Amino acid sequence: MELGNIKRVYLVGIGGIGMSGLARYFHHLGCVVCGYDKTSTDLTNDLHNEGIRVVFEDSASYIPLNFQTPDPGTLIIYTPAIPKNSAILNFFINKGFELFKRSQVLGIISKGMFTVAVAGTHGKTTTSTMVAHILKDSGNDCSAFLGGISTNYHTNVLYGKNDVVVVEADEYDRSFLTLHPNIAIITSMDADHLDIYGDHSHLTDSFKLFASQIKAGGVLIHKKGLPLETGFTYAVEAEADANASNVRIENGDFYFDFNNDKTSITNIKMGIAGTHNIENAVAAIEACLLLNVSPDAVKSALGSFKGVKRRFEYIIKNDHQVYIDDYAHHPEELKACIRSIKRLYPGKKLTAIFQPHLYTRTRDFADGFAEALDLVDELIILDIYPARELPIEGVNSDMILDRMKMWNKRRCGKQEVAEVIRNEKPVLLLTVGAGDIDQLVQPLKQALQDV
């Protein structure tokens, strides 16, 4: 595929965070861009408002005429999350189009560029967005394909005037193996996506393979303790090639000092909360110093970094109420999020609303979820969000509840939960999960604010 020849792009599953980034990228290049997704969301509405046509009916009759016949100017991109029996997907297959996965297209776009790729079972979205923001804010510039909506830029794709690109490298379906980065960051390698990998060792092998694909002369940066034998290590309040020390909270803000063998940056104020985000920041700083960003510019950029939508995002923050929304959907992510909230608000009762994501993940990590959720003071758990999966007999939210030691817990339907919050008015609320729990954010905000 030659990028310069592309005139028309159709995306099957255009509403996904990675797919929508590609849609915006090709639209920015002047291509005719359209696509299909099963439901309308804020993101698909934004695409529509930007001039990208999106349909929600899985029927070949909705495919425009200029996408009916294969030719070198037409690119069809699909996501593995689309069901194999999709009418639109099968139309393109049966017509003889060459179909590309999102990850393949990202690999082709980044091939001729200086690539910073951020991988990890958690932390990659915030870390890649931090790297991109530091490069933009410092005037060094970059393009970026992000796995979330940057709060600073209100988008998931950034356009630069140089040849540096920052990409989020997704381990799902081994997608990141299409990338050959100059700088690679690996934030974590916890067991996940076992429906794809089978067991943790195969996931680990994939990360090692990703690390081996770094270009000659390139650099690997990874969290200390991961089973990787080469590269620079980083940590928080522990010995590593780069670390954060003197971590503290002052007036509700996190501060820390950064050190590696060449550079020290003191009193860095974080624009976002969370010890786990300081860890992400250490990795981002190390990468940006390699790209010749000055220490002062790094410090300034981190202070103005506003984070990513649904990553420790404050929905309400005042003296009487705090409501935080987070995307965490793995036990280790949940622990990091909850512990950071507890550290920020040690005297307040924490009520969490959690929506498990995937039947397989719930089955595989029920014990880990129970242990993580035992850290809150009150839990409301929703039914499992199935995403791409069919139900598994005996697997439901009660698997987690039954394993928890904490007594103040209950299962609740999505329809009832806003009324529960309206009546109880918790002073510290967390919604957490990767499914459609984000649709509850505005109703819950309203419920808390109703007199």
Image (cartoon, rainbow, N blue to C red):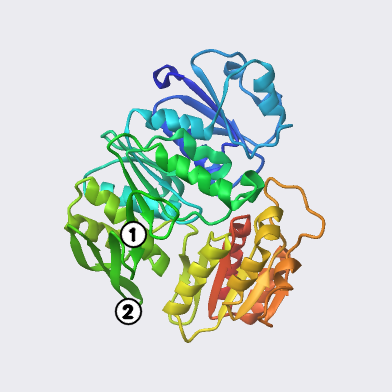
Q: Image quadrant of residue 409? A: bottom right
Q: Is residue 49 visible?
A: no
> Residue at 43% across / 78% down in the picture?
343
Q: Which amino acid type is shown beneath numbered disc 2?
A: Asn
Q: Is residue 350 above or below residue 353?
A: below
Tell me whether the residue at label 1 lies in contact with that at label 2, contact meaning CB atoms closer than 8 angstroms.
Answer: no
Residue 268 percent location from the top left of the image:
25, 67
Spot the residue most to the bottom.
Answer: 347
Q: Is residue 115 left or right of residue 391?
A: left
Q: Image quadrant of residue 258? A: bottom left
Spot the residue most to the right.
Answer: 393
Q: Image quadrant of residue 406? A: bottom right
Residue 298 percent location from the top left of the image:
23, 56
Q: Is residue 113 above or below residue 428?
A: above
Residue bearing mark 1: 234
The numbered dot on residue 398 is none
Q: CA distance from mark 1 to mark 2?
A: 27 Å
